[in-house]
Image (cartoon, rainbow, N blue to C red):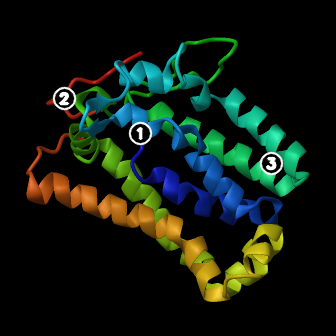
Amino acid sequence: MSWATHEFEPYTLQRHLGKRVSFLALALGSFGPDMFTKWYVCGLDTGAGHVGAANPAQFHRGWPGAGFTHTLAFALVAGLLIWAVTRSRAWGLGYGIGAAAHVISDVSDSAGTMLFFPFSTQHVSLGLWAYAAEAGRYVDAAAYYSSLGAVMDGAWLVLGLLNWRVFRADYFRSVIAPADGAWSWLGRWLPEEALLAIYRAFFFYGAARFTFWLLWAHVLHQYEWDLSLGGPHWVEAVRL
């Protein structure tokens, strides 16, 4: 899984797609596959005990389970449904492309995704780093930010910074807002400064998340770096 890439992807995708897609739809699509399931994968500790999936990887990426959300078919169907309901091509395309980007990014870890579901439940995986949700949220974060996962997040962060013009107010006015009437609707109640803050928030949230977990893993806890394929060696990589 990715810890910050999905927050960075919408900006780069929108930069290349321009007014053909809604940025908000891209962002929601990028979060979509995890939006209602990630909390159950990581689990919650309550006064009554732990609430979460008995087999996190199977629930998250497998079938039976919620793995269908991490498929290209899900991205296509969800995009078409949103297009039909909203009658907005920009929203349908945006959500579908954002969700597809999420699915393709998650191919990189050891669990992979069922890219060709429902025709096949075979998982496609590059195995670049370990999927370690079974070990719990904190160990999974430490493993991700001690492996090539951190490199991927860092690469997307740098790519976003190199395209810094997309965060300018004039870019928002000329490209982002005209592509999606939702900004005009929000503008009835919010000033432009607030709209810009919403637009920029996904990237800055991802940057803060990337920085925090990196410092948490290597300054506060001194986890060992391992940039070998499938690493880190000190955690068991889950494969489906």
For disc 1, the neighbor class at 10 Å (few under 14, some 14 to 19, many from 20) is some
Of the two numbered discs 3 and 1 on the same chain, state the one appearing first in sequence. Answer: 1
Mark 3 to mark 2: distance in Å?
39 Å
Dots 3 and 2: beta carbons under 8 Å? no
Q: Residue at x 60, y 43 (%)?
A: 32
Q: State whether residue 78 is above or below residue 30.
A: above
The Cα–Cα distance between marks 3 and 1, rounded to whole angstroms, is 26 Å
Amino acid carrying label 2: it is Val
- Give residue 178's position: percent from left, percent from top: 82, 74
Q: Secondary structure at mark 2?
A: loop
| Front tag of 2 and 1 | 1
According to the picture, the residue beneath numbered tag 3 turns out to be 92
For image coordinates 83% across by 39% down, the residue present is 80
Give me the C-alpha separation between circle 2 and circle 1. Answer: 21 Å
Q: Quadrant of the N terminus?
A: top left
Position of residue 230 measured from the top left corner of the image (x, y, whole percent): 29, 29
Tell me: 91 left or right of 202: right
Q: Say what amino acid the circle numbered 1 marks.
A: Trp
Residue plotted at (62% across, 56% down): 27
Q: Looking at the rendering, which quadrant does residue 216 occupy?
A: bottom left
Query: As displayed, is residue 45 above or below residue 173?
Result: above
Would you name the residue on which mark 1 appears? 39
**In the figure, residue 158 lies in which quadrant?**
bottom left
Label 2 sits on residue: 235
Q: Earlier in the sequence, mark 3 or mark 2?
A: 3
Q: Is residue 89 left or right of residue 100?
A: right
Contact between marks 2 and 1 (CB within 8 A): the answer is: no
How crowded is the residue under tag 3: few (<14 C-alpha within 10 Å), some, or many (20+)? many
Asked whether, in this view, residue 42 is left or right of residue 11, the answer is: left
Residue 239 occupies which quadrant of the picture? top left
Of helix, strand and loop, which one carries label 3? Answer: helix
